[in-house]
C-alpha cells in the first residue's frame, strides 16, 4: 500500500513539474521517470505513452547536450519496445527495438535491443531470423554483455536448424569468449 502511495506521489510531483515548467531542459527525464513508474506498476499502455513523450522531448533538445538527450531518447525507445512485448504486441515491439538500435547504434541498450529482437524471433519460431540476429550481434557488438549468451543461443538455433557445423563454430566462439574473460587478458578486460 505504501509503495503505491509513494509511486502516486512521485508521479504527481513529476506531472506537476512537467505542467509548471514545460520549457525546462529536465522535461525529458521527468517524462522518462513517469514512464518508468508506470512500467514498474504494470501500467504498460501508459508507460508507452510516457516513453514516447520522453523520446520526443529529448529529441527536441539534442542540440543543447547531444549525448545526454540521445541517452534519454534511446532508452525511452528501447523501453517502449519492451513494454509492447510485455503487452504481446510483438511486431510493434520489434519496430521500436529496431529503431533504438538503428538511430542509436552506440547506445548502451543497442545491443540489448538486438538481443531481445533475436529472442522474440526465436520465441516466434523464426529460427533462421533469430540466427541471423544473434550473428549480427556477435559481429557488431563483440564486447557487449550479451555476446556470450548470443553465441550460445546462436549455436542452439543452428542445432534446431540441423546445421551442426555452424553450431560448432558458435560454440567455439562462446568458448573463446569465456576463456578471454576468465584469463582477464587485454581483450578479456574489454567485455562489459
Image: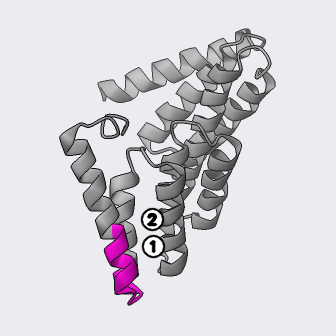
* Quadrant housing the N terminus: top left
> Disc 1 and disc 2: Cα gap in Å?
5 Å
Say above or below: 18 vs 182.
Answer: above
Name above or below for residue 9 compared with residue 103: above
Establish if 96 lies above or below 69: below
Q: Position of residue 156 (x, y in %)?
A: 33, 75
Which residue is painted at 49% across and 65% down in the image? 135
Pick whichever, 29 or 129, lies toward us: 129
Q: Quadrant of residue 132?
A: bottom right
- Which residue sits at x=42%, y=44%? 143
Give the prevailing secondary structure in the magenta stretch: helix
Using the rendered image of the protein, determine whether residue 184 is visible from the camera's viewpoint: yes
Could you tell me which secondary element the residue under label 1 belongs to?
A: helix
Which residue is tagged 2? 119
Q: Residues within 10 Å of mark 1 (few under 14, many from 20)?
A: some
Q: Are marks 1 and 2 in contact (CB under 8 Å)?
A: yes
**Which residue is disc 1 drawn over?**
122
Residue under the point 26% across and 46% down: 180
* Magenta highlight on residue 141: no
Residue stretch rendered in magenta on the structure: 159-170
Q: Is residue 87 visible?
A: no
Q: Position of residue 56 (x, y in %)?
A: 75, 33
Where residue 140 sits in the image (x, y, percent)?
54, 52
Considering every residue shown, the one lying at the far front of the view is 186
Give how far across and how far down residue 186 sits, in percent: 32, 35
- Could you tell me which residue is drawn at 57 percent across and 40 percent down? 47
Outermost residue to the left: 182
Amino acid at each position: 500500500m505504501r509503495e503505491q502511495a509513494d509511486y502516486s506521489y512521485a508521479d504527481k510531483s513529476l506531472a506537476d513539474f512537467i505542467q509548471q515548467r514545460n520549457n525546462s531542459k529536465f522535461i525529458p527525464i521527468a517524462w522518462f521517470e513517469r514512464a518508468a513508474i508506470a512500467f514498474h506498476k504494470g501500467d504498460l499502455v501508459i508507460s508507452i505513452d510516457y516513453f514516447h513523450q520522453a523520446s520526443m522531448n529529448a529529441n527536441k533538445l539534442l542540440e543543447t547536450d547531444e549525448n545526454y538527450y540521445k541517452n534519454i531518447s534511446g532508452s525511452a525507445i528501447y523501453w517502449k519496445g519492451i513494454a509492447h512485448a510485455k503487452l504481446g504486441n510483438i511486431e510493434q515491439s520489434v519496430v521500436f527495438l529496431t529503431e533504438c538500435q538503428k538511430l542509436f547504434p552506440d547506445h548502451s541498450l543497442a545491443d540489448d535491443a538486438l538481443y531481445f529482437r533475436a529472442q522474440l524471433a526465436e520465441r516466434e519460431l523464426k529460427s533462421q531470423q533469430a540466427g541471423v540476429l544473434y550473428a549480427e550481434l556477435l559481429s557488431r557488438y563483440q564486447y557487449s554483455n550479451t555476446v556470450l549468451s548470443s553465441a550460445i543461443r546462436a549455436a542452439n538455433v543452428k542445432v534446431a536448424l540441423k546445421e551442426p557445423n555452424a553450431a560448432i563454430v558458435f560454440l567455439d566462439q562462446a568458448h573463446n569468449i569465456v576463456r578471454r574473460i576468465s584469463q582477464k587478458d587485454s581483450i578479456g578486460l574489454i567485455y562489459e
